[in-house]
Image: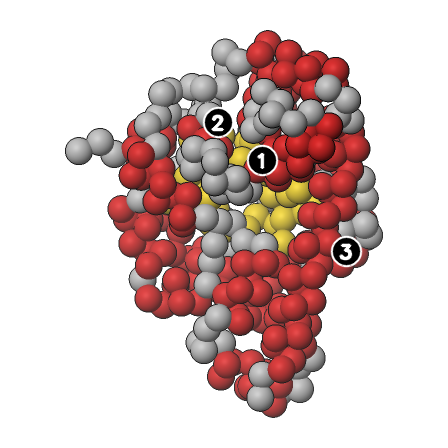
Amino acid sequence: MPDNLHDLSHAGVSIWLDDLSRDRLQSGSLAKLIEGSHIVGVTTNPSIFSAAIKGSALYKNDILALKEAGKNTAEIVTELTTQDVKNACDLFLPIFESTSGVDGRVSIEVNPFFAHETQMTITQGKELWNIVKRPNLLIKVPATLEGLPAIEELTAYGISVNVTLIFSVERYEKVMESYLRGLERRVAAGEQISEIHSVASFFVSRIDGEIDKRLDTMAPSSSLRGKIAVANAHLAYEAFLKVISSDRWKKLSTVGAKLQRPLWASTGVKDKAYESTRYVIELVAKDCVNTMPEGTLNEVREHGVVRGDTVSSNFKVAAELFAALSAAGINFDDVVSFLEKDGVKKFADAWQELLDNVSAVS
């Protein structure tokens, strides 16, 4: 029988699960996915932790004990989430070691309330890094304008970063610049950089969701519906290739620099009229990560036929689609500005819900 997940992995895409919970860890379901579904990493976010803690009784005793010990709600949330991440890091350690640190990674996000506060993001990034104390941890930092110097600073400090909430190639280029500057600062300080890894999380399905909504208002039945998210990711990969072929990158790589790989996030299809595996199958290229919810993983397993690299030959087509989008009257800068603000708000709302749920436990 065909093994679509094997084919995807063999084509150069690292498959990460966009989910984590104590139930997954204790039931063995995550270990089973690692063993049988080519899962080599995990991403988390405030929404995932909120759903995990709200939907499980496995956290209650710890919450009550921590309250009894005098911990406040924020401290309890940190304790719960970092403990799950520690356990997941330990589970993925063999993959981390066998891939020389490329995979076997687990991400934890800084408090989304700090998305526009550079110093607080840096401070909490370091705190989380020191609490978890696992070499295969990634600290998630939003790609807001205020997040960019935090990415540089944390990288220069020696922390591996997962940059999240990227929607545009323009912002992605600034993210890559921040990573390079952090590495260069570290080299200039005489520190090693060979153990620092990074991914840049490009959100995919939300692009189509917002653009399709605008097209339906301005140009009903437009042939551009459902095409811009993939085109946007293709152009992001082109930008990635330009950076890693530059003399600047080659100089860093000679002293041990590791790639900041593109990571395709938000890859579950929102519009059920679209093929359920499109944000996986159309984003296959070397040195990429695709983090997907289990539902999307199952869809790929069942009928996601991998056709090899579906990115590298499509840069011209992607550029033409963006030209057509502009001609149709859609302001892409306005789209990504809205999506960034909306993304920060959604994660902040999820974090507040998480705090409220923990506070309510008695």
Would you say the residues marked 1 and 2 are in contact, meaning their CB atoms lie under 8 Å apart?
A: yes
Q: Choose top left, top right, bottom left or bottom right for residue 65.
A: bottom right
Q: Say what amino acid the circle numbered 3 marks.
A: Phe
The nearer-to-camera label among 1 and 3 is 1
The local secondary structure at tag 3 comes to helix
Q: Looking at this view, is 311 or 220 the one in front? A: 220
Quadrant containing the C terminus is bottom right
Q: Mark 2 points at which residue?
A: 283
| Residue 350 visible in this rendered orientation of the protein | yes
Task: Name the residue rendered at 52%, 70% in the picture.
Answer: 53
Q: Position of residue 325 (x, y in %)?
A: 69, 20
Q: Looking at this view, is 105 or 93 the one in front? A: 105
Task: Name the residue rendered at 31%, 62% in the picture.
Answer: 28
Relative to 312, residue 47 above or below: below
Q: Position of residue 231 (x, y in %)?
A: 59, 22
Q: Say what amino acid the circle numbered 1 marks.
A: Val
Q: Mark 3 points at which residue?
A: 114
Q: Mark 1 points at which residue?
A: 204
Q: Looking at this view, is 87 or 314 the one in front? A: 314
| Residue 163 visible in this rendered orientation of the protein | no
Relative to 82, residue 105 above or below: above
Local packing at callout 1 (Cα closer than 10 Å; few below 14, some 14-19, many 20+) is many
Q: Say what amino acid the circle numbered 2 marks.
A: Leu
